[in-house]
Image: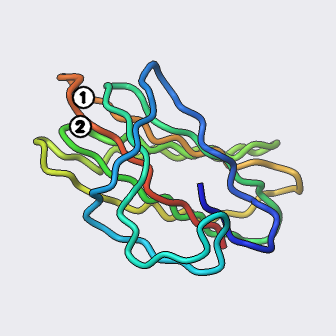
Amino acid sequence: MTRKQGVTAQISGYTLLGNSTVNNYGNNAIGFSWRDGIPITAVRQATFGIATYNGNDGFQISVPASTTQQTLRVYVGISAATCRFTASLSGNAPMSYTDTSLQSPNFNADNGVYTLTFRAATANQTLTVSVIEFNNLNAGMMTLQAATLQ
């Protein structure tokens, strides 16, 4: 996992959801570029990420939520399945969001970016995001490609 150099990490490492194993892959249709990263300093058009291959498996990440507006972008891919994207904000007035619009009915991969602009009602809350693949064939794939927080 590459992170921005010189700042405290805000995006958690991923947690695997389900019974699958994590697989690395390197043929993403979209390339990501960055500079000032660690341990990989700079990359142009990186096409790698992590994937799961069983239905009802996926990934979860979290970020601290403050009273200042923030934007989280989560880049995912799906093949022969549907992505169930959920986001929930902790605290006294919890917020929850679910989306299943990213679908790939066959083995042609489809990529998407979920953009969440959020602000916590009080300090020290957490925004938790899950991306889960679900399908009827248990033959699909879910990828987590990147996440950014501004």
- Spot occupied by residue 137 in the image (x, y as percentages of width and height): 17, 23
Measured as percent of width and height from the top left, residue 138 is found at 24, 23
Per the rendering, the mark at residue 26 is none
Left or right: where 64 falls relative to 89: right
Which of the 4 quarters of the picture holds residue 22? Answer: top left
Amino acid carrying label 2: it is Ala
Instruction: For mark 2, give the secondary structure.
Output: strand
Marks counted in the figure total 2
56 in relation to 1, above or below:
above
Q: Earlier in the sequence, mark 2 or mark 1?
A: 2
Q: Determine the image quadrant of residue 71.
A: bottom right
Q: Position of residue 97 (x, y in %)?
A: 52, 47
**Mark 1, residues whose alpha carbon is within 10 Å: few (<14), some, or many (≥20)?**
some
Q: Position of residue 41 (x, y in %)?
A: 61, 74
As displayed, is residue 141 above or below residue 121?
above
**Residue drawn at x 82%, y 61% as measured from the top left:** 66
Q: Secondary structure at mark 1?
A: loop
Q: Residue at x 50, y 43 (%)?
A: 86
Amino acid on which the number 1 mark rests in the picture = Asn
| View extreme (right): residue | 123
Q: Give the residue displayed 39% in from the left and 53% down from the top.
A: 76
Would you name the residue on which mark 2 appears? 81
Would you name the residue on which mark 1 appears? Answer: 135
54 with respect to 97 (left or right):
left
Image quadrant for the C terminus? bottom right
Local crowd size for mark 2, using a 10 Å CA cut-off: few (<14), some (14–19), many (≥20): many
| Tag 2 and tag 1, C-beta contact below 8 Å | yes
Where, quadrant-wise, is the N terminus in this rendering?
bottom right
Residue that protrudes farthest toward the top in the picture: 19
